[in-house]
Each structure stands twice: as structure tokens, then as C-alpha cells.
Image (cartoon, grey):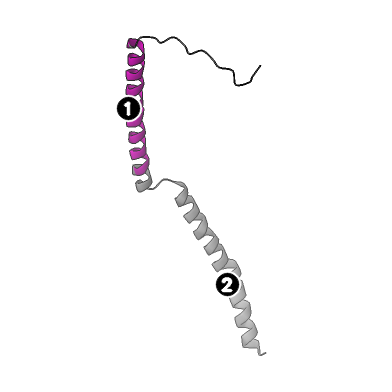
Amino acid sequence: MDEAAIVLIAVTGVLALFVILPGMILHYITMWRKQKTLQPDDERMLEDLWRSAKAMERRIESLEALLEKSEADAPRRPPRPSRSTLED
């Protein structure tokens, strides 16, 4: 190999090691940090889910109140006699 090829390989190696590699690492670190925060679409989706959960919670509380009221208004039945599943 001649001297020009060796210099070219050395310059390429140094450039790759000290410029390109750290640049790639820093690029992916910033991409990773950017993905850690919520995007506006994610925030809207979470807000919609929160509203839906609150609406469902109100509906469940209304149903529970109606059931408690209907149970309080209904006459009590005597308990059924328990049957033994094991023969004595």
C-alpha cells in the first residue's frame, strides 16, 4: 500500500471515531429524551380517557344508588334453608 492510502484510512478512522460516533450517540440521546415527554396527541388522549372514566364513575354511582333504594323499598324475604351437600 502506498502512503496516501494509509493516510486516507487513518483520517477516516479518526473522523469516524471522534466525530461521527459521538454525533450519532448525541442524536439518539436527544431523540430518547424527546420521547420521554408526552406529545400533544398523547395528552389529548389521556384527557379523553379521564373524562370517560369520570362519566363511567358517575353512572356506576347512580346505578348503585338506584339499587340500594330498590333494595330498601322491597319487602324482605325469609332466608332459604341451607342444604347440606354432604350426606350425614
Q: Which residues are magenta?
A: 45-73
Comparing 10 with 68, the one in front is 68
What is the secondary structure assignment of the residue under circle 1? helix
Specify the quadrant that holds the N terminus: bottom right
Residue type marked 2: Leu
Seen as rendered, the residue at the extreme front is: 87
**Which residue is at 32% across, 31% downward?**
55
Specify the quadrant that holds the C terminus: top right
Vertical order, 74 against 1 (above or below): above
Vertical order, 18 against 64 (above or below): below
**Which residue is at 41% across, 10% downward?**
77
Comparing 6 with 33, the one in front is 33
Please provide percent x and percent y for residue 50: 36, 35
Residue 71 drawn in magenta: yes
Residue type marked 1: Arg
Please provide percent x and percent y for residue 56: 34, 31
Seen as rendered, the residue at the extreme bottom is: 2
Q: Which residue is mark 2?
A: 15
- Magenta-drawn stretch, dominant element (helix, strand or loop): helix
Identify the image quadrant of residue 14. bottom right
Q: Which residue is mark 1?
A: 59
Please indicate whether residue 3 sits to the left or right of residue 60 in the image.
right
Q: How many marks?
A: 2
Please provide percent x and percent y for residue 52: 33, 35
**Which residue is at 35% across, 48% downward?**
41
Eye-nearest disc, 2 or 1: 1
What is the secondary structure assignment of the residue under circle 2? helix
